[in-house]
Amino acid sequence: MNLSVRGLALLKKAEGFVGHVYLDAAGLPTIGYGHLLTDMESITRKYEGKTMSESEAAELLRHDAAAAENAIATLVRAPLEQHQFDALVLFVFNIGRAAFARSTLLRRLNRREYAAVPTELARWNKVRNPKTRMLEVSHGLTRRRQWEIDLWNDPSTE
């Protein structure tokens, strides 16, 4: 299964576009539609002093989203509908494969507890403050989780 057009549009909306390197809410160097710079990109300063077009960022996003799609394909054993798959791609794109692999959300989903997924998604609304190292509720993540929950619950426009 692949991310749908609907899912890709929501992923773009959730990530937002920034055409230059910036530090995300967790203090990580990022560019385009939420592309976290790899160690090699940082070492080689691949994007330093450069701007990225939205079309270049969209291509990078499709590549990055493929990693989330792969994580879901290999970790989720429960059958999924397209809207559910899309919601999980947005979620895994944001939190990463490793966090998803050890999440209660995945364990419950693999037990086919579909109704528990929205509650589990909503729990992931905190970010570690880079200055205090404490977890804090993020209004942006709270909004994003709600979009994922809404997508999870709404098969109407597949």
Image (cartoon, helix red, strand yellow):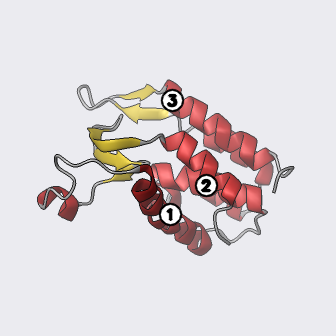
Q: Is residue 142 above or below residue 109?
A: above
Measure the C-alpha gap from mark 2 to mark 3.
Answer: 18 Å
| Amino acid type, residue under disc 2 in the picture | Leu
Q: Which residue is mark 3?
A: 140
Disc 1 crowd rating (10 Å Cα; few below 14, some 14-19, many 20+) is few
Q: Is residue 54 above or below residue 122?
A: below
| Amino acid type, residue under disc 1 in the picture | Arg
Q: Which residue is mark 2?
A: 8
Measuring from the top left, give residue 78's x and y in whole percent.
73, 68
Q: Are marks 2 and 1 in contact (CB under 8 Å)?
A: yes
Question: Disc 2 on helix, strand or loop?
Answer: helix
Note whether residue 144 is visible.
yes
| Amino acid type, residue under disc 3 in the picture | Gly
Measuring from the top left, give residue 108's x and y in whole percent.
68, 56
- Quarter occupied by residue 60: bottom left
Position of 153 with respect to 144 (left or right) is: right
Residue at horizontal 36 percent and vertical 34 percent from the top = 25
Measure the C-alpha gap from mark 1 to mark 3.
Answer: 22 Å
Please tell me the numbered disc located at residue 62. 1
